[in-house]
Each structure stands twice: as structure tokens, then as C-alpha cells.
Image: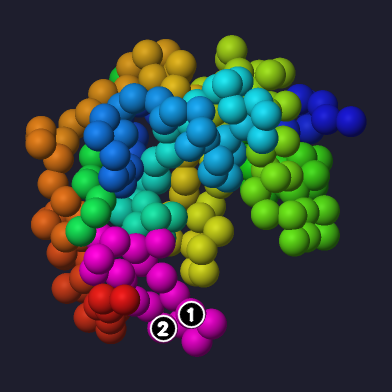
């Protein structure tokens, strides 16, 4: 039985670091996605998509790119980036002016949430979505979202899944000039590629 006292929490100070999001669809930088598209890691489980909406972001640009399958790594640690997908995504950065409180779904919390490797083997996102709904229903008024170290190989950053209704709670705001640049034109992305020249560009 899940007990709140068993859970670790993650608190981000206001102004501590920008959050970064890649998005493809119009107004995807701010508006909640339609219910039929709420099907990612900690979205509500099937049949409950109306329960809440999530704004996914990360604390590093490589983590956001990995989550969107732009940055990829194979079993031999060969990194590539998908030029075609990169051209589809725009980059938006956020700041927040109030403390932001997240429940990690990794680390010590994994087992008590039913998310340890053996507990979720071959089950895809469903165990995460079931756990996320329970956490939302219990703590969604006082906690602002969920977090985890990127599950992609070598874990390039941390992911923050903010419940949309808490954008105002933490005073989230976009700090990227409008219109937002495409990833292929983003200065931080270009600097990252220069710093790691072994990352191969591919056009599938």
C-alpha cells in the first residue's frame, strides 16, 4: 500500500535552472494537448485521459532531444542525431518564480510505486501511467508534477512532468524569444554538436 511518508520528494528553487521543452504542434509550448494525445510516460492511463494533462520538459537540451528521439544511442554507445526530426521541433525555455515540488518516479521511490524493473517488465508505459494517476489523485493539489532521470542510455538529464494546472502555481513563464527557433538553429544545440563531434548526423 502506497504511503506518502515512504516517498522522496524533489524541490526546485525558483530561478535555479531553466526547463527546456521541444514541441512540434501549434501552441504545444503552452497549451494542454488534446485528450487523445495524452499517451506518454506519465499521462493518465487509457480511459482516464480527461483526468489531467502534462507539460513535459527537461533540465538539459540533450535530455529533451533524447526524449523526442532526435538524439539516439545504440548498444555500442554510438550517438546519432536525426536531422529530419530535429527540423520538426521548436525549442522553448521556461523559468518559474515559485518553488516547484516533484515526486520522483525513479530512485528510492521506484519500488514503492511498483516501478522496479521486475514489477514493470514488458509492460511499456502502463505501470507508470497507473502510478502517475494515483499520485495525481492523492497529491495533485500540493505537488506540482513528477520527475525522473532520463531513461535513455547514459541518462543525459532529468525530466520534469509538470501538471498543467500548476503552471500558474509555480509562476511558470516562457523566456525564449517568440517565435521560438527550430532545434536545428538553436545556439545551444549547435554548440553541443560542436563540443561532441562524434555525434553523427543521419537523415533516415
Q: Position of residue 13 (x, y in %)?
A: 40, 28
Determine if the magenta segment contains residue 101. Answer: no
Classify mark 2: helix, strand or loop.
Answer: loop
Rendered-image quadrant of the C terminus: bottom left
Q: Is residue 55 above or below residue 20?
A: above
Q: Position of residue 115 (x, y in %)?
A: 75, 48
Q: Compare residues 91 and 101 and report the one nearer the observer.
A: 91
Q: Is residue 75 visible?
A: yes
Left/right of residue 60 with respect to residue 161 in the rendered view: left
Q: Which residue is mark 1?
A: 74
Q: Please give the range of residues in magenta.
A: 69-86
Q: Is residue 8 visible?
A: no
Res. 173 mark: none
Give the image quarter of residue 55. Answer: top left
Classify mark 1: helix, strand or loop.
Answer: loop
Q: Are marks 2 and 1 in contact (CB under 8 Å)?
A: yes
Q: Which residue is mark 2?
A: 78
Name the residue rendered at 18%, 31% in the picture. 175
Rendered-image quadrant of the N terminus: top right
Name the residue rendered at 51%, 63% in the picture. 152
Q: Compare residues 16 and 20 and report the one nearer the observer.
A: 20
Q: Compare residues 201 and 6 and report the one nearer the observer.
A: 201
Amino acid at each position: 500500500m502506497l504511503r506518502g511518508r515512504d516517498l522522496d520528494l524533489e524541490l526546485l528553487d525558483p530561478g535555479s535552472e531553466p526547463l527546456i521543452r521541444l514541441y512540434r504542434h501549434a501552441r504545444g509550448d503552452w497549451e494542454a494537448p488534446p485528450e487523445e494525445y495524452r499517451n506518454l510516460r506519465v499521462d493518465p492511463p487509457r480511459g482516464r485521459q480527461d483526468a489531467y494533462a502534462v507539460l513535459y520538459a527537461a533540465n538539459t537540451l540533450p535530455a529533451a532531444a533524447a526524449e523526442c528521439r532526435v538524439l539516439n544511442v545504440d548498444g555500442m554507445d554510438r550517438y546519432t542525431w536525426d536531422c529530419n526530426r530535429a527540423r520538426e521541433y521548436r525549442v522553448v525555455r521556461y523559468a518559474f518564480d515559485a518553488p516547484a515540488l516533484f515526486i520522483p518516479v525513479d530512485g528510492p521511490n521506484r519500488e514503492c510505486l511498483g516501478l522496479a524493473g521486475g514489477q514493470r517488465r514488458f509492460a511499456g508505459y502502463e505501470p507508470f501511467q497507473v502510478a502517475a494517476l494515483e499520485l495525481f489523485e492523492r497529491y495533485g493539489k500540493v505537488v506540482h508534477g513528477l520527475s525522473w532521470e532520463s531513461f535513455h542510455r547514459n541518462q543525459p538529464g532529468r525530466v520534469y512532468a509538470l501538471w498543467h494546472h500548476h503552471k500558474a502555481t509555480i509562476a511558470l513563464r516562457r523566456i525564449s524569444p517568440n517565435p521560438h527557433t527550430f532545434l536545428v538553429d538553436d545556439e545551444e544545440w549547435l554548440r553541443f554538436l560542436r563540443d561532441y563531434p562524434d555525434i553523427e548526423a543521419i537523415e533516415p
